[in-house]
Amino acid sequence: MKELRNFPYAHILVLGLAKSGTAAARLLLQNGKNIRVNDKNASDTDDAVDELKSMGAEVITGSHPLSVLDGMEIIVKNPGIPYDTPLLQEASRRDIPIITEIELAGNLSETAMIGITGSNGKTTTTTLTTEMLRASNQGAQIAGNIGHVAVEVAQSLKKDEKMVLELSSFQLMGVKTFKPKIAVLLNIFEAHLDYHKTFENYKNAKCNIFANQTADDYLIYNADNPTVTEAVTTAKSIKIPFSLKNRLENGAWTDGNNLYFKNEKVIEKKDIALTGDHNLENILAAICAAKLSGAANKGIHSVLTNFSGVRHRLQFVGNFHGRLFYNDSKATNMLAAQKALSSFKQPVILIAGGLDRGNEFDDLKPYLKNVKGVVLIGETQDKLKRTALEAEVSAIKMAGSMNDAVNQAYQMSEHKDVILLSPACASWDQYRTFEERGDMFIKAVHTLL
C-alpha cells in the first residue's frame, strides 16, 4: 500500500460515498486517519457502509447534520455535491478546507500525471492519449471522471507507468496542490452553471488544472479557443498549443491534409478513423500529450487508424434496415450536440432532451438545418419543441421512454438517414448516468431487428 505524503490531517470528513468517496475513505483509514463518513442517500445496511464501519470509520447516513463538522480538519467531498449546500457553507464559515478525491490521488502518485479537461472532448482525448502510450510500449493507466477512481489507480501504478486523468470542473474545483506534469485544456464553453453559478467560477475551476504547475511542467491548450488563450496567459508552465487554423512551430496543427507535431508529420488526415473537426482537435491534443510523454509516431498512427470512438460519444451502433444509428449520450450540453450534428451531411432524425438546467436552446437552431425530424424526451421537451418549431423542423414528436423514442425516430426515417441520440442535456431526470441512457438507446435499437 502506498502512503499519503504531505497530508497532515488526522480527523477527516468524507462527504458522499459512491465509488470515489468509498475509495477515499478506505485509503484514509489504511493510512491511520480518523474518518467520519456522511452520506444522506446511503443506508446503514449498504455494503460500503458495513465495510467502512468494520475498518473503524464513523458513518452517518440519511441526512447532513451540521454536527458532522465538529472536530473535522478537512473534508473530502464527492464532486457532485454543490458547494452551496448548508453543510458546506457552514464548513466554509469554519474555515475547514474542502477537497475532492483527485487531490489525494495527486498526493499518492509517484509518477508523471497527465491531466485532461475541457467542456467537451475529455473522454475521447483521455482514451486516445492512453492508447497512444500503450501502443508505444509506454505503461499507462486511465483514471478520473472516465469511471476509474483515481486513488485506486494511483495505488496500483507501477513506477514506470503514467496515470492519464480525465478531470471535470467539479473535481478540479476541489484541488489545493494537485499538479499534473502535463495538463491539457481542450476548450472552455458555458456549461454547468447550475452548479458553478457563474461562467467565471466555471472557468476558474477548469484553470485549476494548471494553477500549481511550474516551469518544469507542460500545458497543452487550444489556440483556437479565445477563452482558453486568454486563460492560459497566467500559466507558469511550458505552453504547447494546438490548432486547426494555423501552423504552429511549437505545437500540433494540420494543413488540411496532414497532422503535424511541430514540423514533424505524424499522420495523413485521410487515414484517421474518427470523423468530425471536433475530433481533430481532440486528436491534436492527444498527439501533443503522447509525444511529450515519449510515444512513437508508429504507435500514434496505429491508434488513429483503428480508433473509431469511445462508448456513448458519437458511437456507431449499427446499420439497421438502412438507417445509421449513433449513440452520443455523452452530449450533455448544447455544444456537444452541435458538434455531433455538424458531423453528418445526410438527413438526421435527432433524439434529444433531458434534465432542465434552466437554459434555452436557441444556440442549437443553426445546427438543425439538416434535421428532418426530432423526437424529444425528458424535462426539456417543451423547450426543445419551441426551438425545433422556430428552426422549421418538419416533424416533431414527444416520447415517454427511450424505446418509444427509438421507435418513433425509426418510423419517421427513410433509407440512409442517420438516427442520432445527442440529448444536449444531462440524463438525471430519467437516468442515473449518461451511460445508462446510452445503453438504453443501444438496447432499443437492437429490438428493431
Image (spheres, rainbow, N blue to C red):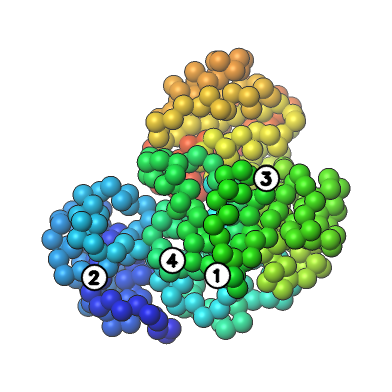
- Earlier-in-chain disc, 2 versus 4: 2
Inspect the image, locate mark 2, and give the three-letter code of the amino acid beneath it.
Glu
- Earlier-in-chain disc, 3 versus 1: 1
Separation of disc 4 and disc 1 at Cα? Answer: 19 Å
Q: Are marks 3 and 4 in contact (CB under 8 Å)?
A: no
Q: Are marks 2 and 4 in contact (CB under 8 Å)?
A: no
In the image: residue 119, left or right of residue 98? right
Read off the residue under disc 2.
73
Q: Which mark is residue 224?
A: 3
Number of residue marks: 4
Count residues near mark 3 (Cα–Cα under 10 Å), then give few for <14, some for 14-19, many for 20+: some
Read off the residue under disc 1.
214
- Earlier-in-chain disc, 3 versus 2: 2
Q: Locate residue 407, reporting x and y percent.
A: 56, 29
Q: Is residue 151 visible?
A: no
In which image quadrant can residue 298 be found?
bottom right
- Earlier-in-chain disc, 3 versus 4: 4
Q: Which of 8 and 126 is in front in this view?
A: 8
What residue is rendered at 31% in x and 51% in y?
83
Dot 1: element: loop
Inspect the image, locate mark 3, and give the three-letter code of the amino acid beneath it.
Asp
In which image quadrant can residue 290 be found?
bottom right
Q: Are marks 4 and 1 in contact (CB under 8 Å)?
A: no
Separation of disc 2 and disc 4 at Cα? Answer: 18 Å
Dot 2: element: loop
Q: Can residue 354 be seen in this view?
A: yes
The quarter of the image holding the N terminus is bottom left
What residue is rendered at 69% in x and 24% in y?
370
Inspect the image, locate mark 4, and give the three-letter code of the amino acid beneath it.
Ile
